[in-house]
Image: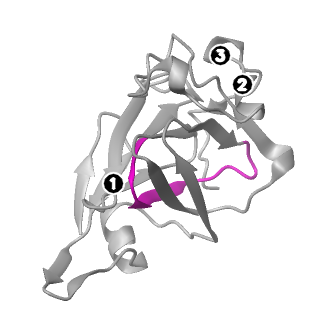
């Protein structure tokens, strides 16, 4: 597995070694030993999967402590634009984001540590998206930001007129209006 650093410390891309032949392919999609060697120790406790079609934008979501989540995401069918926004107050990259295209062919994985809002946009006709979380889902701890906050400057690669949102995702605050954000000085893994 190869580690690719991004412009925000801690947000990384993992490229697995894929072995292909006439029968198809094989790759190790996750190895705790390799992940710890390359990234850090993270105890994933929940796997999630979603299926969506072109134009769907999900996000920008996060969970507040003590239920904050790191995520390791990948696409098993189709193509998405995956986005991580730094929402750690005091961070040198606060309010900045990393956007990464993930697809089933390349098999890249995107790791977002705790303290980031996460979202993705489906760029193919259909996409199946999987992710590991290091904390269980806690609805009372949900937080989110507006997907289209101009201060974030995210190009979702989809015309705004074609974006499909859940009712809930239509009403999130902008970063400047958010009532709750992470503290950069606190270790989110304690």
Identified at 72% across, 25% down, the residue is 170
The image quarter in which residue 74 lies: bottom left
Mark 1 vs 2, N-terminal side: 1
Vertical placement of 95 versus 117: above or below?
A: above
The image quarter in which residue 27 lies: bottom left
Seen in the image, is 74 located left or right of residue 27? right
Q: How many angstroms separate mark 3 from mark 2 (CA)?
A: 11 Å
Vertical placement of 40 versus 154: above or below?
A: below
The residue identified by callout 1 is 103
Identified at 43% across, 47% down, the residue is 125
Seen in the image, is 143 located left or right of residue 23? right
Label 1: element kind:
strand
The residue identified by callout 3 is 174
**Quick one: quadrant of the C terminus?**
bottom right
Label 3: element kind:
loop
The image quarter in which residue 156 lies: top left
Magenta residues, as a range?
Answer: 64-81
Label 2: element kind:
helix
The residue identified by callout 2 is 170
Report the residue that reaches farthest toward the bottom: 23
Does the CB distance between marks 1 and 2 fall below 8 Å?
A: no
Report the residue that reaches farthest toward the front: 125
Q: How many angstroms separate mark 1 from mark 2 (CA)?
A: 26 Å
């Amino acid at each position: 597995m190869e580690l690719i650093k991004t412009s925000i410390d801690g947000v990384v891309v993992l490229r697995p070694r894929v072995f292909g032949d006439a029968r198809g392919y094989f790759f190790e999609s996750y190895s705790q030993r390799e992940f710890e060697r390359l990234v850090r120790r993270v105890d994933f406790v929940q796997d999630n999967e979603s299926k969506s079609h072109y134009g769907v934008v999900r996000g920008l979501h996060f969970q507040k402590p003590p239920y904050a989540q790191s995520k390791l995401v990948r696409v098993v069918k189709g193509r998405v634009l995956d986005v991580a926004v730094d929402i750690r107050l005091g961070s040198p990259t606060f309010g900045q984001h990393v956007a990464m295209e993930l697809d089933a062919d390349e098999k890249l994985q995107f790791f977002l540590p705790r303290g980031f809002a996460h979202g993705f946009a489906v760029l193919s006709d259909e996409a199946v998206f999987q992710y590991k979380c290091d904390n269980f889902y806690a609805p009372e701890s949900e937080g989110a930001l507006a997907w289209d906050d101009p201060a974030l400057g995210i190009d979702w690669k989809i015309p705004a007129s074609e974006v499909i949102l859940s009712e809930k995702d239509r009403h999130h605050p902008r970063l400047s209006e958010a009532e709750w954000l992470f503290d950069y000085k606190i270790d989110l893994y304690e």
